[in-house]
């Protein structure tokens, strides 16, 4: 019995030594994976990829009882891998427009929880910070389910050099924030971004509050915190309330219960790895009858579904427009390349702005 125990322990020690070597080798490979994610502005967690790996690797285990334990083992290994990447990510600089507590800041923090989020005064300044190397990636809003597209961001993408490597959805819940000692009955004036004031119009009208516009919701909260006036309130997020020491006097005051903002993550390098399955194109068509219809027809003929099509005026050319198109699928294959070749013949300008995973809720 003693010999069997000693033999089992010897086997375990031998395997542990092999596993230690393989673990170190695996983590060095993780470093390369992280560098790819950093370069392309991708988040550490890729849940779809992890689920696929677990399913694939679990199939190697024949014992059905041990298979469950092996799945737990794999999940722990992947958690450790993410922790190591998070440590490396501490040096990642993420640009956003606004102040701490703004929805863009919240979105940036959720996509890159271990990174350094750097505020800029406006969309253009945040975008240029990545172009000139001051920041690694930038997180900018491209669309709101209530207010529509964010034209400033689309214009920057059209004219600039950065690529979209991710699009994420952040549910926007607006709250009335006041000083800790304030009550709803104390409030007379409410400050916030014009869009937030518009979203909460019914609530504001019901209570007959006067309003004050600010550049963003977090700045409104900051003003209320510094003013020290119980009759003064702000419309902003729950995170912003905690940040500036304010109390939520009324939660969920926006008119539409479904209010979501889509944020794009942009970097200098275009991602092209296999799991990324949506594409953004921007194009201008020749000033001829049927040009846009021809472009749309080419896209359809290659089996691509357009999940979004928007037009934007070109600032330097009166009455001329560029078009923003989101496609289900990637152009990084033979079919996609042929489609782009055909599109180029009917377009004055054609730009592949990025490839990314399907929308992810933050």
Image (cartoon, rainbow, N blue to C red):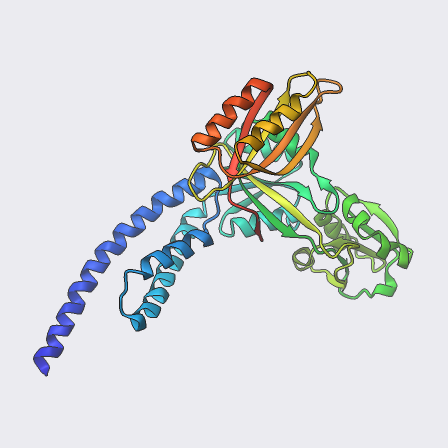
| Outermost front residue | 301
Residue 348 sits in quarter: top right
Residue 32 sits in quarter: top left
Residue 199 in percent (x, y) is at: 79, 50
Residue 231 in percent (x, y) is at: 85, 58
Q: How many marks?
A: 0
Q: Is residue 333 above or below residue 219?
A: above
- Is 341 displayed left or right of 294 in the figure? left
Residue 129 in percent (x, y) is at: 56, 33
- Is 226 displayed left or right of 104 in the figure? right
Q: Is residue 7 above or below residue 200?
A: below
Observer-nearest of 330 and 163: 330
Residue 244 sits in quarter: bottom right
Q: Specify the quadrant that holds the N terminus.
A: bottom left
Q: Is residue 176 above or below residue 100?
A: below
Residue 164 in percent (x, y) is at: 54, 36
Q: Is residue 193 visible?
A: no
Observer-nearest of 339 and 317: 339
Observer-nearest of 56 and 182: 56
Q: Residue at x 51, y 52 (%)?
A: 113
Q: Residue at x 64, y 38 (%)?
A: 308
- Is 356 displayed left or right of 273 in the figure? right
Observer-nearest of 106 and 348: 348
| Outermost bottom residue | 1
| Outermost right residue | 208
Q: Residue at x 39, y 41 (%)?
A: 35
Q: Is residue 76 visible?
A: yes
């Amino acid at each position: 019995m003693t010999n069997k125990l000693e033999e089992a322990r010897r086997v375990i020690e031998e395997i542990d030594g092999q596993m230690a070597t393989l673990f170190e080798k695996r983590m060095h490979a993780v470093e390369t994976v992280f560098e790819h994610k950093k370069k392309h502005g991708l988040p550490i967690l890729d849940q779809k990829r992890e689920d696929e790996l677990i399913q694939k690797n679990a199939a190697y285990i024949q014992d059905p009882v041990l298979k469950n334990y092996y799945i737990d083992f794999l999940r722990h290994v992947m958690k450790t891998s993410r922790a190591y990447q998070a440590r490396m990510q501490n040096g990642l600089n993420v640009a956003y427009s606004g102040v701490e507590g703004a929805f863009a800041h919240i979105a940036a923090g959720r996509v890159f929880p271990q990174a350094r989020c750097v505020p800029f005064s406006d969309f253009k300044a945040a975008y240029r910070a990545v172009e000139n190397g001051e920041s690694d990636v930038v997180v900018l809003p491209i669309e709101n389910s209530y207010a529509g597209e964010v034209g400033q961001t689309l214009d920057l993408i059209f004219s600039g050099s950065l690529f979209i490597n991710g699009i994420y959805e952040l549910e926007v819940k607006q709250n009335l924030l006041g000083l800790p000692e304030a009550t709803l009955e104390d409030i007379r004036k409410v400050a916030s971004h014009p869009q937030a004031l518009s979203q909460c119009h019914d609530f504001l009208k019901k209570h007959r509050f006067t309003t004050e516009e600010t550049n963003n919701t977090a700045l409104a909260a900051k003003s209320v915190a510094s003013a020290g006036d119980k009759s003064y309130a702000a419309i902003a997020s729950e995170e912003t309330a905690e940040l500036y020491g304010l109390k939520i006097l009324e939660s969920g005051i926006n008119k539409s219960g479904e209010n979501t903002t889509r944020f794009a993550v942009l970097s200098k390098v275009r991602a092209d790895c296999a799991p990324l399955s949506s594409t953004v194109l921007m194009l201008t068509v020749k000033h001829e009858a049927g040009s846009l219809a021809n472009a749309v027809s080419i896209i359809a003929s290659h089996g691509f579904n357009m999940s979004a099509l928007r037009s934007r005026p070109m600032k330097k050319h009166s009455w001329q427009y560029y078009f923003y198109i989101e496609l289900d699928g990637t152009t990084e294959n033979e079919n996609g390349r042929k489609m782009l070749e055909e599109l180029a013949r009917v377009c004055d300008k054609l730009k592949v702005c990025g490839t990314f995973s399907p929308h992810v809720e933050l």
